[in-house]
Amino acid sequence: MDLISKGIVKYYQLMLQGDPRVKGLPLMDSPLPTMAICLSYVYFFTVLGPRLMENRKPFEVQKLMIIYNFAMVICSIIFVYNDLKYHWLTPQASFKCDPVDYTNSPNGLRTMYNSYFYFILKFVEFVDTLFFLLRKKFDHITKLHLIHHGIMPFSVWWGMKFVPGGHATFFGFANSIVHIVMYIYYGLSSLGPSMRPYLWWKKYLTAFQLVQFIAIMGHSFQLFFRDCNFPKLFGLWIGSHGILFWFLFTDFYKKTYKKPIANGAIKSSTKSKEVNLNSSLDGNPEKKALKNGLRNSVTKLKKSS
């Protein structure tokens, strides 16, 4: 009991060290509600949601998807604009060392509230998964998707509580630039099959996301080599997320864009072999049996590939 009591005391002492400006903002007094929402998200979309949709037909949500995706483009643009105006384009901002402005100055407050806006958007993005569920696209609710959406609100909460500005804003800034492009892609995709010829650049969107994580890692870990009035612990916290997502998205990139090319090459090679066999054996009555046998072998090869 004594150990539990000490843990509770330390927890409340830690909460008291948070930025006093965020006190009273919804969800910001304790990480527990955010953690509960994130855990509920994972449970609902992996267990309860699929059960509820099991005997139901997919919902028609195309119009809602169009509205949502382009609304998210606008929200991301608003965040980037505010981050530029009130932080990154100010004389105090620096990509090398950027302490948090904890004052009630106009720029300090606006940066803090803009960070809170980013935090709330992480919950709004749960709608991505909701559309997959309603359309019964269960295969789209992957491990990558669940980890990415499931941990982000909880991860951002700690930054919002203790460092809502300064060096920490780069993560949201870079991420929101990517989200502008990403939700434009999703919005165009939701318009229907007629847009498919114009969506050839999905591969490059994923590559753009990977570049984002490399930038976040570099920006965060540089704090360990500089004398900067910004908590190195949060540099580690942010940078570790960059590492995690870099590996997850790299795995997705390899599985999505590398494997189909290899399979295509095998099939193309197999088809070429079949054509060559036909051209060399046709017109030779003495080799009909051999031709049939080789054709069967090619068929088996195609099935195995």
Image (spheres, rainbow, N blue to C red):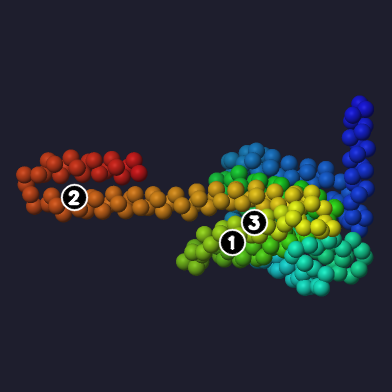
Which amino acid type is shown beneath numbered disc 2? Answer: Leu
Locate residue 5 relative to residue 146 in the image: left or right.
right
**To which residue does mark 2 refer?**
277
Label 2 or label 1, whichever comes before in sequence order: 1
Label 3 or label 2, whichever comes before in sequence order: 3
User: Is 143 drawn above or below residue 219 in the view shown?
Assistant: above
Camera-nearest residue between 101 and 152: 101
Residue in the picture at 81% in, 58% down:
227
Quadrant of the frame with the C terminus: top left
Which amino acid type is shown beneath numbered disc 1? Answer: Phe
**To which residue does mark 1 refer?**
208
Q: Residue 181 location in percent, x, y?
A: 62, 65
Q: Residue 259 location in percent, x, y?
A: 44, 49
Which of discs 3 and 2 lies nearer the camera? The answer is: 3
Q: Count neighbours of disc 3 (C-alpha within 10 A) and say few if under 14, some if 14 to 19, many if 20 or more.
A: many
Camera-nearest residue between 166 and 4: 166
**To which residue does mark 3 refer?**
213
Locate residue 258 relative to residue 302 in the image: left or right.
right
Which of discs 2 and 1 lies nearer the camera? The answer is: 1
Can residue 4 be seen here? Answer: yes
Quadrant of the frame with the N terminus: top right
Quarter-wise, where is residue 298 in the image?
top left
